[in-house]
Structure formats: structure tokens, C-alpha cells
Image: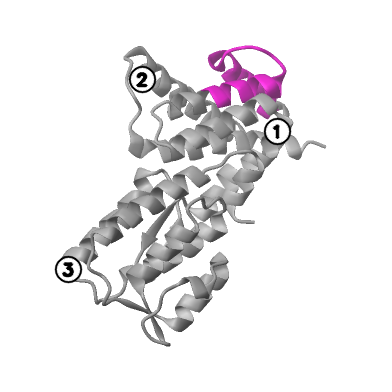
Amino acid sequence: MEYIEILKKHGLELCDGAKMTKYKISIKNTLGGLEANDVFVPYDIVFRICQSTGTDLDDIPYFSEEEYSASDFLLNLLDLGQNVSNIKDFIGFLALLSIVLQDKHFSSTDYISMQKAAYEGLDKFCLPYYIQDGVIIPKGEKLFDDGLVIDVIEWLSKYPKTHALYLEGIQQYFNKNILVADTLRKSLEIFLQEFLSNSANLETNIPRIGEYLKNQSVENELRCMLTTLITHYKKYNDKKDKHHEASDPKLWEFLLYQTGLFIRMIITVKNAEV
């Protein structure tokens, strides 16, 4: 299952209809200022995209039996789906957009304007995709997303308070919310409380989780590695909080994966208990 759909199953909507609609409107506004009627999309591509997005071919104006005006096709597709609410339709639109962006018939100025609106818009409206060389790519590294985000979300279903906070942190990460680092720290603190069945703060529970791992025959070097990393993780957040500083956005992905790694290691050991 695609990771965005898995997040949606857990109530986390990273690609909601409002964001998709705003993005499409921004593209429509850009198209309205371009002289692009000499740019054409082949019929077979139009047919395939109409099939994937549920668009009636009869509603798309054409200039020949074999080619469609790219700008008119895009504008009509936008008009037909103003309130797009599912990812499949949106991916269909991005697929068409990426095809148009690779067309060499745009003037250089128009081409740059379209690229700027398409690429920057995904980031501006916090949509979890980017377009590279005409290919639509979900943000994040799939290997890490599966192991350190998706698996952790699934496993945290047994720890409801942590589950809710961790999802909030992911939402903040995608929305570029400066509170993301603190929310992830809180999710780790609450996880240790739920896991150890206590209400102690993060600092107090660090040696306790080390003792748990020792009782599960985890080697000293690995126990110390985990507890030391969590200690520095806590110190980093404490320093930012003390000085009322926001964490550096380029480090948010690392903090997200690191939080998931801490939780994953502990739950993996728990699942191996005899």
C-alpha cells in the first residue's frame, strides 16, 4: 500500500482536497497568463490520463483528431475537477502537468513560469510530492519511510497516546510547522511512559529503558548507544526550548527518522520476548 494511503488510514491526511485544490488553482492562474495554444498533447496521452482521472473526452476541446491543446486541456481538466478529493485524481493531474513541462513548444519565459508554479507550488501548499525530470516522486526515502515511519505508526496502535502525538509530529513535518521537533520529543517521552507503565519524564526514563534492554539481554554497547543518543536528543530539544529557538528545518527529517528509530528498536526487542 502506498505510504500516503497508509497514513490516511490512521487519520493523517497529508494530501487533503483543500491543498490539492489550492495547488490546481495556482496552476490555473499561471496558465491563464500564458500564450500556450500552440502546445499540443498527443491523443493517446490525453486518452490515458482521462481514463485515470475519470474525465470525459467529449468535455475536452480539440484542434485535430490526433492532438489536443495542452493549455486548454489543463484548464478544462481543472474546471471539471475543482474539488478534487482523492490522491489518484491528483496524481493524474500531476502526470499531465509533468508531460506539459517537458514539451519544448513553450517559449522560454512561459516554460520557466510553468516550472516555477508547478515545482514551488507543491512545496508552498505542503503537498508530499515533487517532480524531477518529469517524474512524480513522493517526498521522503521509501526505505526509511517504510521502516521508520509506517511500521512505527502501525506498531504504535497499541500505545494510543504516543500514536496520536507521533501522527501530529508527522503532520507538522509536512506542514513545515516549527513545533515539529518538540512534538516528536513529546511523543518519545509519552511512548516510554506507556511502554514502562509510569508517568516519569524523559530524563528519568532513559536509564529505566536501558535497564529493560539489559534484562532482555541486549548488549551493553547497544544499550549505551541508545540511551546516549536519547540523552543528546533530549539536550538538543531542551536547549532550543530554553532559548526559545526554533529547530533548523533541514534537520526535521533526521529528527523524524531518529524518533522512529528509537521507538522501532524498543518495540522490536519487546516483540522478540519469549
Residue type beneath disc 2: Lys
User: In the rendered structure, which disc, 3 or 2, sits on the residue that comes first in sequence?
Assistant: 3
Residue labelled with disc 2: 240
Residue at the location (44% across, 66% down)? 95
Residue at the location (34% across, 24% down)? 246
User: In the rendered structure, which disc, 1 or 3, sits on the residue that comes first in sequence?
Assistant: 3
Locate residue 124, reporting x and y percent.
34, 44
Residue labelled with disc 3: 108
User: How dense is the environment of label 1, judged by Cα within 10 Å: few (below 14), some, or many (20 and up)?
Assistant: few
Q: Which mark is residue 217?
A: 1
Marks 1 and 2, how far apart at CA = 35 Å
- Element at label 3: helix
63 vs 177, nearest the viewer: 63
Marks 1 and 3 close (CB-CB < 8 Å): no
Q: Is residue 270 magenta?
A: no
| Quadrant the C terminus occupies | top right
Locate residue 18, reporting x and y percent.
48, 43
Start and end of the magenta stretch? Answer: 186-214
222 vs 242, nearest the viewer: 242
Locate residue 150, reporting x and y percent.
61, 45
Residue type beneath disc 3: Ser
Residue at the location (23% across, 63% down)? 34
Marks 3 and 2 close (CB-CB < 8 Å): no
User: How dense is the environment of label 3, judged by Cα within 10 Å: few (below 14), some, or many (20 and up)?
Assistant: few
118 vs 162, nearest the viewer: 118
Residue type beneath disc 1: Ser
Q: Which mark is residue 29?
A: none
Marks 3 and 2, how far apart at CA = 45 Å
Of tags 1 and 2, which is closer to the observer? Answer: 2
